[in-house]
Amino acid sequence: MRLLLIDNSNTRTKFALSAPGQQGYDIQRVPTRELEPTFIEKLQALEFDASVISSVVPEKTALLREGLTARPLHEISHQSALSIGIDYPRPEQIGADRLANAVAVHARIGAPAIVIDFGTAVTFDVVGGSGTQASYLGGVIAPGLASMTDYLHQSTALLPEIDLAEPESAIGKSTTEAMRAGAVYGYRGMIREVLQAIQRELDAAPTVLATGGDAALIAAGLPEVHEVIADLTLEGIRLIGERNLT
């Protein structure tokens, strides 16, 4: 079955087609604010048998549902058939993207495992247990890296908007470099502290994977992160789609 995979997040929406035996994804990205009926009409012209939607933007979910309903469609939620259990008091509160990440990491490396997704927010999602007894346990949500730097620029008179990059030094020799050092080194410190706190509550040492827009930059200075996988969320969307549509 040829699937249209949709990862609808707050800032950007990703689209990719997946076919049996395919390696990797040809990903198309569009700013979520530009996701309108005219764009969805273009999606309808693509060759696919069914679509799988992971969305955290209800307004855009409704547009996608309406525009793609002519073919089989699955919206990921806690009610989806998953390869792992859910050990969470109110599972309806879990974001579809977080479930996709949890399913993908379990398929790749088993459990215990942690996925850090660097997006508009940074999320930590924890899969505990082992084998067929693995379950989504919950996680952590914190402001995304860009959210922090944008806030500084918008809330101060003299601090500029910056491009995120590896700082030249921890001691900034310009305002831009000082902001980069604060953002990158400070953010790595936050990630490391959260990981340590999570690991203290697990029975065994987890494997940590990272994904999302800022993953490569931040993980470069974090030996705790085993691997960065850019398309991990899409991989989870595909796996859930195959389980629920075929």
Image: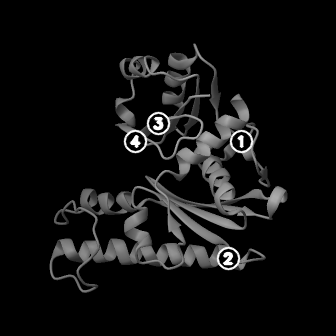
Between the C-alphas of marks 1 and 3, the distance is: 26 Å
Q: CA distance from mark 3 to mark 2?
A: 34 Å
Do callouts 1 and 4 mark residues in contact (Cβ within 8 Å)?
A: no
Residue at point 60%, 40% (across, down): 238
Query: Dot 3 corresponds to which residue?
Result: 16
Measuring from the top left, give residue 190's x and y in whole percent.
49, 74
* Left or right: 6 as drawn, with respect to 98: left
User: Which of the 4 image quarters holds residue 203?
Assistant: bottom right
Q: Which residue type does callout 3 highlight?
A: Ala
Locate the N terminus by quadrant: top right
The vertical placement of 150 against 30, above or below, is below
> Which mark identifies residue 92?
1
Name of the residue lying farthest toward the front: 21
Where is residue 11 shown, x and y percent of the image?
40, 43
Instruction: Give left or right: position of 77 versus 8.
Output: right
SS label for mark 4: strand
> Hey, what amino acid is under mark 4?
Arg
State the mark number for residue 12.
4
Residue plotted at (41% across, 40% down): 26
Secondary structure beneath label 1:
helix
Residue with the most extreme top position: 70
Check disc 1 and give the amino acid type.
Glu
